[in-house]
Amino acid sequence: MDPDELSPATRVVSLGRVPREPGAQVGAPLTLTSTYHADGGTSYGRVGNPTWTAFEEALGSLEGGESLVFASGMAAVAAALSLVPHRGRVVVPTAAYNGTLVTLADRADAGEVEVTHVDITDTGAVVAALDGARMLWIESPTNPLLEVAEVAALSRAARDRDVLVVVDNTFATPLLQQPLAAGADVVVHSATKYLSGHSDLLLGATVTAATERGRALHERIRRHRQLHGAIAGPMETWLALRGLRTLSVRLERACANAAVLAERLAQHPGVDRMRYPGFGAMVAIDVSGDAEAAERVAAATRLWVHATSLGGVESQIERRRRQPGEPEVVPENLLRLSVGIEDVDDLWRDLDAALGAI
Ligand SMILES: *Cc1c(COP(=O)(O)O)cnc(C)c1O
């Protein structure tokens, strides 16, 4: 069947498999090789791998473009940032993934790029910052404040000014948001998170539009991957594809859990402010109290996993400002909650009890 006619819930299951032939394996290939017999399609393991192709086929279809897999989300971020010309200006949210912000700050210190920080929810202010810029970097919802950007309006304004638009779609996943359809040029993912979903690997990916402009970007990013060597391990890629098979059901449960918890947390006396964009499975709370109070809550959980990272089947909790490089606009008492797929009442009982530790 034509993948374009299949719903995303079917595509996550059915794409990236070997052709249906009698005796062929049902699952995706796990190809462990550094090189290939000469005169075939792929020459060397840094250039291509059938396991990458399987993952890229599935993710590319979900995002509506052409995907490239990387060793981590940050390798994909670095590849996307390589599209900025020397001394080009990048417009970026004030609060975004700290690895992206720190990379940009380091490159700005070295005189390689200029950076303008914006409130990504203020479309007028973002558009005003675009003149003369070379790249607009969007996260939506942002990590960890869960702010939502108007991706389509921003992409249109950027396109008018010849500014490349990159969207880090890690939090929403292609099942909840497809930035390429909204006019973005490049999507980046930390596949470490929801796409793989089991907290057992690191992986990243880019996706570019299947247009002439998109193909040119794809080729530049592919060349970056081949020459910088930040390539994905076939084993990690295979595991990520296996995890991707259940993305639709995992996300359905996690999002339903998050909606219930967000409502209950908003009423909780231990919570000063509850942040939830109305979709997705990420919630953040500013606890009533200081950084130490927030740390006590995270440490007091028994079911929630006190750890950095997100998007796994298990619910995870962390005070974000304990991470060096986290921007100062993130409150010291903010706890980021990555809601998993456990029973929601078990999650609530644990969280409610932990909030008693304030
Ligand atoms: C985790 C994360 C990254 C970095 O991904 P790694 O796989 O850890 O390298 C980038 N962007 C966002 C939004 C993330 O949450």
Image (tube, grey):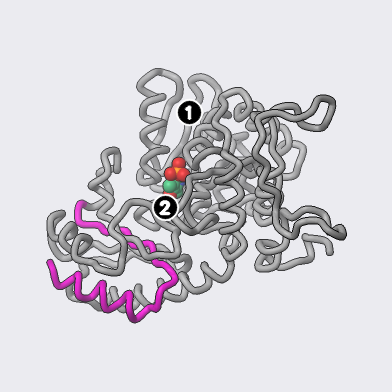
What is the distance, in whole Å, between disc 1 and disc 2 at their CAs? 20 Å
- Identify the residue under disc 1: 89
Q: What's the residue at 12%, 66% (across, down)?
A: 358
In terms of depth relative to the viewer, which is nearer, 146 or 123?
Answer: 146
Q: What's the residue at 40%, 71% (across, down)?
A: 258
Q: What is the three-letter code of the residue carrying label 2? A: Thr
> What mark, if any, has residue 195 been given in the picture?
none
Q: Which image quarter: residue 41?
A: top right
In terms of depth relative to the viewer, which is nearer, 96 or 2?
Answer: 2
Q: Is residue 88 magenta?
A: no
Q: Position of residue 321 (x, y in %)?
A: 24, 48
Q: Secondary structure at mark 1?
A: strand
In terms of depth relative to the viewer, which is nearer, 174 or 162?
Answer: 174
Q: Position of residue 276 (x, y in %)?
A: 38, 66
Q: Whereabouts is ligand 1, in terms of quadrant?
A: top left
Q: Is residue 339 magenta?
A: yes
Considering every residue shown, the one lying at the far front of the view is 23
Residue bounds of the magenta highlight: 332-358
Q: Is residue 260 left or right of residue 224?
A: left
Q: Secondary structure at mark 2?
A: loop
- Identify the residue under disc 2: 142
Q: Say few, some or many: other residues with alpha carbon within 10 Å of mark 2 (under 14 / 14 to 19 / 20 or more).
A: many
Q: From the Cβ of disc 1, is ligand 1 less than 8 Å away? A: no
Query: Going from the N terminus, do you reach mark 1 or mark 2 first?
Result: 1
